[in-house]
Amino acid sequence: MSDFIPTWVDGDLVAVEKLEAHRKGLLHKAVSVFVLCGEDVLIQRRAMGKYHTPGLWANTCCTHPRWGEASKACAQRRLREELGITGLSLRYREQITYRADVGGGLVEHECVDIFAADVPDPVKPVPDPEEVMDVAWIDMSELSQQVRREPAKFTPWLRIYLVDHADRIFA
């Protein structure tokens, strides 16, 4: 059931095919990770083959847990799969629910468990080109300024995290 994600339907948590959940804008579980090095954060640019928001910059990684998969295990799995990053100590930061149009008639309506990892030196990701086309370390204040100046370059969820929830995620 790897294409099925935990989704709330009529108050019950059930497995729904990922694309169906996005087409219908159903509330579903998600995970987001921020890898931090001092004032810098690792961001990724989504591969052009992604079915929504291709080519846009996002947080370090984000995904949907598989049915029955714990959020922290999911975060660790996707760091490894998307960026080749392992061995980080993830700490739970916050749970945020948001709804955003991601284009093409698709909606992300997510209940997101957010994790952060602090590293003493910038890690060097080895991105999976099917998932990630570029990575960058950027100062948090510079990232916030860029999101305000050119929001169309960034995923809706990253904009929401930085504009509405930065104090809860990065405090």
Image (tube, rainbow, N blue to C red):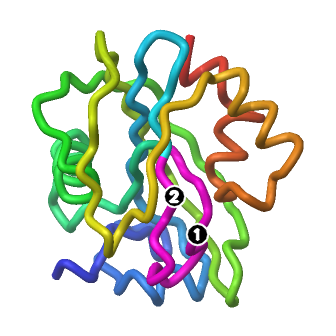
The x and y percentages for residue 96 are 56, 40
Q: Residues within 10 Å of mark 1 (few under 14, many from 20)?
A: some
Residue at the disc numbered 2: 45
Q: Amino acid at mark 2?
A: Arg
Residue drawn at (18%, 27%), measured in percent from left and top? 88
**Residues rendered magenta in the picture:** 44-59
Q: Quadrant of residue 8?
A: bottom left
Q: Give the distance between the C-alpha atoms of the residues marked 1 and 2, in whole angstroms.
A: 6 Å
Residue drawn at (81%, 53%), measured in percent from left and top? 151
Q: Quadrant of residue 160?
A: top right
Q: Quadrant of the N terminus?
A: bottom left
The x and y percentages for residue 32 are 42, 45
Magenta-colored stretch includes residue 51: yes
Magenta-colored stretch includes residue 2: no
Q: Quadrant of the C terminus?
A: top right
Residues at marks 1 and 2 touching, judged by CB atoms closer than 8 Å: yes
Residue drawn at (50%, 52%), measured in percent from left and top? 111
